[in-house]
Image (cartoon, grey):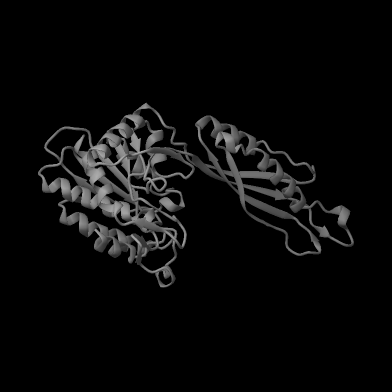
Amino acid sequence: MIAVLREFVECESPSTDRDAVNEFGALVARHFDVLGARTRVHRLSNRSNAFQFDFSAETRAPRALLLGHLDTVYDLGTLRNMPWREAAGKIYGPGIFDMKAGIMQAIFALRGLLAQGPLPCPVSVLLVPDEEIGSIHSRLVTEKLAKECGRVFVLEPAAGPKGACKVGRKGNGVYTLRVQGIPAHAGLDFVKGASAILEMSQQIARIGSLSNHARGITLNPGVIRGGSRPNVVAAEAEVQIDVRVLTKTQARTIDARLRHLRPLNRRCRLEVTGGMNRPPFESNSKTMVLYRRAAACAAELGFPLECATVGGASDGNLTSALGIPTLDGLGAVGDGSHSSGEHVIAAELPRRAALLARLLSTC
C-alpha cells in the first residue's frame, strides 16, 4: 500500500495544471485496469479529465459510488521542498492526506473484495480533476452518475485524530462585492471624490456582522483590492468573501443579505456577484443509516468509528443535496491538509481500506 501511495504522491497534480492531473489520472487508471475495471474518461471543457471506473456484479443490488478527486492544492515542484517522508509512524507529502491515500485505499479495498469472488454490488469509482477549485466543470458528471447509484461513499480524509466519518458539511460560496467611487486629487479636490475604499471598509464591517459562529455561519472577507495611488481618491475597490453555512435556509438568508447591501455614501455604487458553490450537506436519516452500518463494520474490525459535521465542503455536498444517501470521510486518517505538514497515519491505511471493503460487502 505504501509503495502505491508513494507512486501517487510523487506524481504531482495541481488543479490548475491540466496535463499534470491527466498524467496522474492515467497512472491511477493503470491500477484500476489491473482490477478489471471498465474505464471511461470524461473530457471536460478547458479542464483536465474526470476518470470513471466501473465494476459489475452478479446481483441486482443498487450501484455504489466511490467519489474522490485527482487534484491537489500544491503547485508543480512542491516535492522539492516537501518531499515524501516517513517518520514516527506518519507519512508526509503533498496531497497525501487530501486525498491520494483515499484513492489508494479504494484500490486495495476493491482488490480485497475481488480476490474473494464477484463483488456484492456494482461499483463505480469517479475521480474528478477540479474538486479543490469548486468542481465547476465536473459537477454535472458527478450529479449524473450519482443519480444512477443507491449510495455514495466519499473518499475524502476522515475527521480528526480518531478518524471520524463525516455525516454533515457546511455549504460554501464565494461572493465578490465591488464598489464604484468617484476619483479625485486627494490634495486639490478631496471633497469632489467619493472613496471606494472608505465605502468598502464600512461594508466589510457590515459583512462581518453577519457571521454567527454559534449557528455555524461564517463570512470571511479574504481578499481585498482597491485604489490606484496614494494621492488619488479611490475610484474602485473589491472584496472576495468566503461564506460557510450549515443549512439551506441559512444559505438563502445570507445570499439575500449580501445582495441587498446598500451604499452608505450615496455617491458610490455597489455590485454583488458570485454565490453559493456547494449546498450544505445536512445530516439526515439516510446518512445516519449509512453511518450506523459503517460503525457496525468498524466494530467487527475491532475499532470504534465516530461521526462528525465539519466546516469544509466536498463533492459529497452535491450528492447529498440530490437526496442520495452519502457518507463522507472514508479516506485516510491524518492531519495537515493543504499545509507543509500534511500527513497520514501509516498504521491506519490497511484498517481504513478494510472498513471500506466491509462496508461495500453489506450492499
Q: Position of residue 316 (x, y in %)?
A: 38, 41
Q: Position of residue 93 (x, y in %)?
A: 38, 63
Q: Is residue 4 above or below residue 213?
A: below
In the picture provided, is 10 more to the left or to the right than 260?
left
Q: Residue at x 26, y 48 (%)?
A: 351
Q: Position of residue 292 (x, y in %)?
A: 31, 32
Q: Is residue 349 above or below residue 260?
A: below
- Quarter of the image containing the C terminus? top left
Asked whether 63 or 272 is in front, the reply is: 63
In the picture provided, is 272 more to the left or to the right than 68?
right
Asked whether 283 or 349 is in front, the reply is: 349
Residue 148 makes an appearance in the image: no
Q: Residue at x 16, y 49 (%)?
A: 112
Q: Residue at x 61, y 34 (%)?
A: 256
Q: Is residue 299 above or below residue 89?
A: above
Q: Residue at x 41, y 57 (%)?
A: 46
Asked whether 86 or 266 is in front, the reply is: 86
Seen as rendered, the residue at the extreme right is 188
Residue 5 makes an appearance in the image: yes
Seen as rendered, the residue at the extreme left is 117
- Quarter of the image containing the N terminus? bottom left
In the picture provided, is 27 more to the left or to the right than 171?
left
How many numbered marks, from 0 up?
0
In the picture provided, is 148 more to the left or to the right than 229?
left
Q: Position of residue 134 (x, y in %)?
A: 45, 49
